């Protein structure tokens, strides 16, 4: 078997080329005016600006001419050291005598005028000062009057905020540059032998990073993309353009045309601009590449999509007069093993296939703790919760809330669930692979969304729940097969270097799994336990998407078995997806030039698929990405359509019929799918650092308010309708308040919202009479009140 695998990998793969994926375009900009003596280049409000004494010019949009700028108020510009963008505007670091800086001054380009604004005085004048920003927080560092290095931060969002002293890097040397990138600060410290690079992060403090092996030219250090630094480095008299990858700490040299030695350097676009010793203005800009799919890749994708449509057509032709039971819960005839695999397919969306490897690649395996803890929670669910609800023969899990409490509670909770599924899951799950694939392969993001959205809508509306479950079944094997191949390919490609790179990964704690700290701003073991207790153990029924599969099984015993199958697959499946992230880290640690600095971190795995894998296999794994997205999309669309039909059409329509309910659900399947596609296109207009984090945050804000109602219904006899309604409203309001103050890690929002709903709902219920109706079969207690 090992020989067969090795032979296949050798035949299909081979070692990736060592050349860079990115290209560098370079050239010369318009010459500066003749009276621009010793000009300094800055970027203000995204435009190239040149300063000389009391004069200023801005480069025209076409780069062909420098246009004079008026100064308001008029004055000298020779005390301006550098510019930094933060808080939606540009700040100039300015100073008095010598090389000391004493203030930051806001500045804007208003028409043809360079206008100054708010001034932030530094705590003390600083020599050799450098300024940078992380988000809306300004950082300034330099040498104080005592000869020691000082670092200060100022949060622009805080009203009446002030400068706060921060610990500076250890050791001595001259501060060459300071730059913020992706949650960290980078300081370049120089001496006669060469420059050192220091990195600060909130959890690790200052640590020394690998040195550039030369001298970084002042003014050339800049952030590029989400995880790169770009700079010019002088070594042995030669100047080269280099990148530093902040995730793998690897250096790469870019191929750039030779240019005159730089004098004054500034950021420009996705590169740098500088005045040369020849008096001209030169630039070098990084450009990413596209990796177009070949005919073999497209053939594989077309075969996959045709297969999905074929399954939908099969079930449509098999029963063209589907009843509500057939369309919504597959006639309650789905085998438990198929339902369990479908549960896993639905739970492992494109977030699992793309964003989780990206998260593991960027950080470590800490989020995998959720899978380990969730399995324990699912055991409780399989024994106690699912059989209870399965015996009620529901099609909408929110029917339970009507039976236990009141129709209004059912409709309120159902409406919130629909908003959560469409707003926080459907749009993100559709957008994530579309953006990644479009970014890498050149397929327009609109077409990527259309392909996945339309094909999913077609087979879902034609085949109903049966088509959803059996396409899920096929899609699990497509996406898991592609994921396993990718890991094997990386291990094979690294060859003899694998052990060394693996040891580097261990040294960087890339497989760290458990964090037992009590820091509420981080995802820790305690946070996962907290979330699983409330999100799985106490409130599993809130998720119509998952519960619908258990409701489609033949009996309450088989419903419980489907959960056991789901739990059994979850841990090995999780290890596979997190292993992809670590394998990617190892690969790009060894091949930093194969990265595209302009791509978001979430596009790392699609980049590897498109740029490194052989034809055919690329198409297969992109089909796996489609499968990961489409399996969850179809489940969400079908479940939301079910809720709209069962919870709203059947309740609000005049003279509802079973056929009318199914027809309404079919229409809603199309409407919901189109709504998700529209929201996905809206998301594509925003620069989002991690869609994994965004999905967690949105689910917490939208999905927790109603979930506690199930805990109050199943685990208490005292909860009543008014109390539960107050609990839902109060939890939503207080969770939004916690979110507005950024009090805890987003992973806690869902658990906090559920806990608030339980506590507020129970206490509020004590203010109203206890339920008078029979609770038989509605709680986990064997002897219910009657």
Image (cartoon, rainbow, N blue to C red):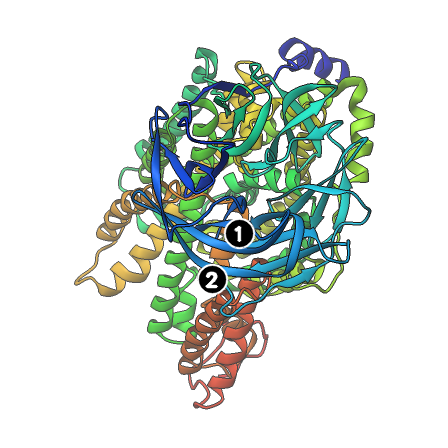
Q: Is residue 563 above or below residue 606?
A: below
Q: In x, y percent, where is residue 245?
A: 65, 33
Residues under numbered marks 2 and 1 in contact, where contact means CB atoms less than 8 Å apart = no
Residue 367 circle label = none
One can see residue 508 in this view: yes
- Name the residue at 60% across, 18% down: 20
Q: In x, y percent, where is residue 221?
A: 61, 35
Q: Nearer the viewer, residue 768 or 138?
A: 138
Question: How many numbered marks have been drawn onto this rendered protein structure?
Answer: 2
Q: Nearer the viewer, residue 660 or 127?
A: 127
Name of the residue lying farthest toward the top: 11
- Name the residue at 44% across, 85% down: 771
Q: In x, y percent, where is residue 414?
A: 37, 62
Residue 135 circle label = 1
* 502 with respect to 416 (left or right): right
Crowd around label 1: few <14 · some 14–19 · many ≥20 (10 Å): some
Q: In x, y percent, where is residue 66?
A: 36, 30
Which residue in the structure is indicated by mark 2?
Answer: 701
Q: Quadrant of residue 151?
A: bottom right
* Screen quadrant of the N terminus: top right
* 641 with respect to 742 (left or right): left
| Element class at badge 1 | loop
Q: Quadrant of residue 321?
A: top left
Q: Nearer the viewer, residue 101 or 188?
A: 101
One can see residue 547 in this view: no
């Amino acid at each position: 078997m090992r020989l067969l695998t090795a032979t296949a990998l050798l035949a299909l793969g081979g070692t990736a080329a060592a050349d860079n994926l990115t290209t560098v375009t370079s050239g010369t900009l318009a010459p500066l005016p003749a009276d621009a003596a010793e000009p300094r280049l800055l970027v203000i409000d995204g435009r190239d600006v040149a300063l000389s004494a009391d004069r200023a010019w801005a480069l025209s949009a076409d780069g062909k001419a420098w246009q004079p700028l008026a100064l308001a108020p008029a004055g000298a510009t020779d005390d301006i050291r550098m510019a930094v963008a933060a808080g939606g505007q540009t700040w100039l670091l300015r100073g008095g005598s010598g090389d000391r800086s004493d203030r930051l001054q806001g500045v804007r380009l208003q028409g043809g005028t360079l206008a100054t604004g708010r001034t932030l005085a530094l705590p003390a004048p600083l020599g050799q000062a450098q300024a940078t920003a992380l988000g809306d927080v300004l950082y300034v560092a330099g040498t104080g009057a005592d000869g020691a290095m000082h670092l200060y931060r100022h949060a622009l969002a805080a009203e009446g905020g002030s400068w706060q002293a921060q610990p500076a890097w250890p050791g001595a040397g001259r501060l060459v540059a300071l730059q913020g990138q992706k949650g960290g600060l980078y300081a370049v410290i120089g001496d006669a032998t060469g420059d050192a690079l220091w990195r600060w992060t909130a959890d690790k403090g200052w640590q020394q990073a690998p040195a550039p092996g030369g001298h970084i030219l002042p003014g050339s250090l800049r952030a590029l993309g989400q995880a790169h630094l770009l700079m010019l480095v002088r070594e042995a008299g030669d100047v080269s353009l280099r990148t530093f990858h902040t995730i793998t700490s690897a250096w790469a040299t870019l191929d750039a045309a030779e240019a005159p030695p730089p004098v004054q350097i500034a950021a420009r676009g996705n590169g740098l601009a500088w005045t040369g010793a020849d008096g001209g203005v030169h630039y070098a800009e990084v450009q990413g590449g596209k990796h177009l799919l070949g005919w073999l890749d497209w053939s594989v994708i077309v075969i996959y999509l045709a297969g999905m449509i074929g399954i939908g057509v099969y079930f449509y032709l098999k029963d063209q007069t589907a009843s509500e039971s057939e369309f919504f819960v597959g006639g309650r005839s789905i085998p438990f093993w198929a339902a369990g695999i479908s549960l896993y397919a639905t739970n492992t969306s494109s977030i699992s296939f793309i964003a989780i490897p990206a998260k593991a690649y960027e950080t470590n395996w800490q989020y995998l703790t959720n899978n380990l803890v969730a399995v324990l929670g699912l055991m409780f669910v399989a024994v106690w919760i699912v059989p209870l609800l399965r015996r009620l023969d529901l099609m909408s899990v929110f029917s339970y809330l009507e039976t236990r409490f009141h129709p209004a509670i059912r409709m309120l909770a159902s409406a919130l669930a629909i908003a959560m599924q469409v707003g926080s899951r459907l749009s993100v799950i559709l957008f994530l692979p579309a953006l990644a694939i479009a970014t890498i392969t050149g397929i327009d993001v609109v077409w990527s969304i259309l392909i996945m959205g339309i094909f999913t809508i077609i087979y879902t509306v034609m085949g109903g729940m049966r088509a959803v479950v059996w396409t899920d079944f096929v899609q699990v094997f497509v996406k898991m097969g592609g994921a396993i191949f990718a890991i094997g390919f990386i291990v094979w490609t690294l060859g003899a270097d694998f052990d060394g790179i693996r040891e580097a990964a261990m040294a960087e704690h890339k497989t760290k799994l458990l964090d037992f700290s009590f820091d509420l701003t981080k995802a820790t073991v305690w946070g996962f336990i907290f979330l699983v207790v409330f999100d799985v153990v106490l409130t599993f029924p809130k998720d119509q998407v998952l519960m619908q599969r258990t409701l489609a099984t033949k009996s309450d015993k088989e419903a419980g078995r489907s959960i056991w199958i789901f739990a059994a697959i979850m841990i090995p499946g999780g290890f596979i997806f997190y292993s992809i992230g670590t394998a990617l880290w190892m690969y790009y640690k060894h091949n930093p030039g194969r990265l595209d600095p302009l791509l978001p971190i979430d596009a790392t795995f699609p980049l590897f698929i498109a740029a490194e894998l052989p034809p055919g296999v690329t198409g297969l794994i992109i089909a796996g990405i489609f499968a990961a997205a489409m399996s969850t999309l179809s489940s969400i669309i079908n479940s939301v359509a079910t809720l709209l039909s069962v919870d709203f059409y059947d309740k609000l329509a005049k003279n509802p019929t079973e056929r009318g309910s199914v027809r309404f659900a079919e229409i809603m399947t199309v409407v919901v799918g189109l709504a998700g596609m529209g929201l996905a296109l809206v998301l594509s207009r925003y620069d989002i650092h991690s869609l994994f984090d965004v999905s967690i945050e949105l689910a917490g804000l939208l999905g927790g308010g109603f979930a506690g109602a199930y805990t109050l219904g199943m685990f208490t006899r005292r909860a009543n309708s008014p109390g539960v309604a107050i609990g839902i409203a109060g939890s939503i309001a207080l969770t939004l308040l916690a979110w507005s103050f950024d009090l805890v890690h987003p992973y806690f929002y869902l658990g906090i919202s559920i806990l608030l709903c339980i506590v507020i709902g129970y206490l509020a219920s004590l203010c109203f009479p206890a339920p008078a109706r029979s609770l038989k079969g509605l709680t986990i207690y064997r002897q219910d009140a009657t």
